[in-house]
């Protein structure tokens, strides 16, 4: 047997860094040799309260001693009831019922199923550059890169892809991009997927894997108007952008839009596997009996950690911190554009910022890879995204301070210099 640093893990798993972590503390990971890394990946936006926040650790430890697994279609337990009540308070409008799973892709699958069952219509509209998951239904709704669907064809039918208002990619201003994409959506509904056959539109208000691309108020409100006019549901995927990351608790709140379905995961439980989607009871109860379930969804320990996560977010003002310190992060990164021709766009909100890297007007994933590797060598962990992997993404924990942001940006600036 050939030995590798992955041991017996599947060779198809591709690690983004060479870090062998032993423990985490707040914004830092510490490897087996004691090297500290400023972790601005946050486990792909998962460790929202930082690594091993004492309050989250204490809540999980206490729950482990009481009940670890209480399968929630077999028995009921207090953590899931308490969490559901707290989440209902955070949901927009009349959204008040929640289904739990373990991963974001499961939440997307369950939301897809409900949309079809509740409306009696088969088709779904998603948007170019979206990422909703890796399982069959969610992968069929994913277009952030072909690698999520390669070798999986034929995929699930009934999914129509509409353009997303990526103003930078189209070479348009925000208003023109929104108008163009809304016109194209109207054309799709006239020519490809009639409203009578279309159950819902699912959208990331700020795209994640597709390149950290925000939508716009004009587009999101236009989408809501079309859903209302055509009796279609509007589902927002808040798996990566939600839970305070963008300086609002939900990223769709930036656009003053009321969705019918909200999907959430990642930052929900500070690292414990937990996901879910929520809808108004009047929509949720239109799903078919027995169509929802799962062995690990709503795990008691994960729910306890999620309750503690909400406490920390509220008590420490982490949504406001993401908004204010995130604005500083974006300003610092914007200031690097004039000094580095490769940094052609800085976009996003709060602690969800993408830096697009190009060379001679072309996406340069190799340069972006070298940049993050130099950052790693100097103690800063960052990830890439986008179809060409040329967008360096910033996902600090919501607890990150201005001093830590400045430390990270200073390392990034040196990496830009070092990779010319």
Image (tube, rainbow, N blue to C red):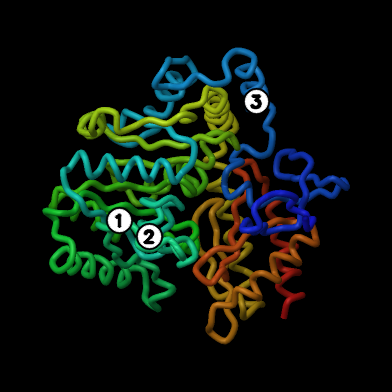
Residues at circles 1 and 2 in contact by the CB criterion of under 8 Å: yes
Q: CA distance from mark 1 to mark 2?
A: 7 Å
Observer-nearest residue: 417 or 3? Answer: 3
Residue 377 placement (x, y as % from top left): 80, 62
Find numbered disc 1 in the image and state the secondary structure of the residue it sits on. Answer: helix
User: Which comes before the other along the chain, label 1 or label 2?
Assistant: 2
Question: Above or below — where is 135 with respect to 292?
Answer: below
* Residue at image location 43% in from the left, 22% down from the top: 72
Observer-nearest residue: 369 or 287? Answer: 287
Q: CA distance from mark 1 to mark 3?
A: 37 Å
- Circle 2 residue: 215
Residues at circles 3 and 2 in contact by the CB criterion of under 8 Å: no
Pointer 2: residues within 10 angstroms few (<14), some, or many (20+)? many
Q: Quadrant of residue 375?
A: bottom right
* Residue at image location 23% in from the left, 51% down from the top: 224
Residue 351 placement (x, y as % from top left): 56, 51
């Amino acid at each position: 047997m050939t030995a590798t640093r992955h041991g017996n893990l599947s060779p198809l798993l591709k690690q983004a860094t060479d870090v062998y972590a032993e423990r985490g503390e707040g914004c830092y990971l510490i490897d087996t040799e004691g090297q500290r890394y400023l972790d601005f990946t946050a486990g792909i936006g998962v460790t929202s309260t930082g690594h091993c926040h004492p309050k989250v650790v204490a809540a999980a430890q206490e729950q482990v001693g009481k009940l670890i697994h209480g399968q929630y279609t077999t028995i009921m337990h207090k953590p899931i009831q308490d969490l559901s009540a707290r989440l209902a308070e955070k949901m927009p409008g009349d959204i008040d019922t929640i289904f739990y799973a373990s991963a974001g892709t499961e939440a997307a699958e369950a939301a897809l199923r409900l949309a079809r069952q509740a409306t009696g219509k088969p088709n779904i509209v998603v948007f170019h550059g979206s990422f909703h998951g890796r399982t069959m239904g969610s992968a069929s709704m994913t277009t952030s890169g072909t690698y999520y669907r390669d070798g999986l064809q034929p995929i699930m039918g009934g999914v129509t892809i509409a353009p997303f208002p990526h103003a930078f990619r189209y070479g348009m201003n925000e208003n023109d991009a929104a108008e163009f994409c809304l016109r194209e959506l109207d054309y799709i509904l006239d020519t490809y997927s009639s409203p009578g056959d279309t159950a819902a539109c699912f959208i990331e208000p700020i795209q994640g894997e597709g390149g950290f691309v925000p939508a716009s108020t004009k587009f999101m409100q236009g989408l809501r108007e079309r859903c209302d006019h055509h009796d279609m549901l509007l589902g927002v995927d808040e798996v990566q952008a939600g839970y305070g990351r963008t300086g609002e608790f939900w990223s769709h709140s930036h656009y003053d839009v009321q969705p019918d379905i909200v999907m959430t995961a990642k930052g929900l439980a500070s690292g414990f596997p937990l996901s879910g989607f929520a809808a108004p009871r009047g929509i949720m109860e239109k799903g078919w009996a027995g169509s929802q379930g799962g062995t690990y969804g709503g795990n008691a320990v994960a729910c306890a950690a999620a309750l503690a996560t909400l406490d920390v977010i509220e008590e420490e003002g982490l949504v406001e911190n993401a908004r204010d310190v995130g604005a500083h992060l974006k300003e610092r990164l914007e200031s690097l554009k004039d000094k580095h021709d490769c940094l052609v766009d800085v976009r996003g909100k709060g602690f969800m910022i993408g830096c697009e890297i190009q060379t001679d007007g072309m996406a340069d994933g190799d340069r972006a890879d070298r940049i993050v590797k130099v950052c790693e060598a100097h103690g800063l962990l960052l990830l890439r995204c986008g179809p060409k992997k040329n967008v360096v993404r910033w996902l600090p924990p919501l607890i990150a301070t201005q001093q830590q942001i400045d430390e990270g940006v200073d390392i990034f600036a040196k990496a830009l210099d070092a990779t010319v």
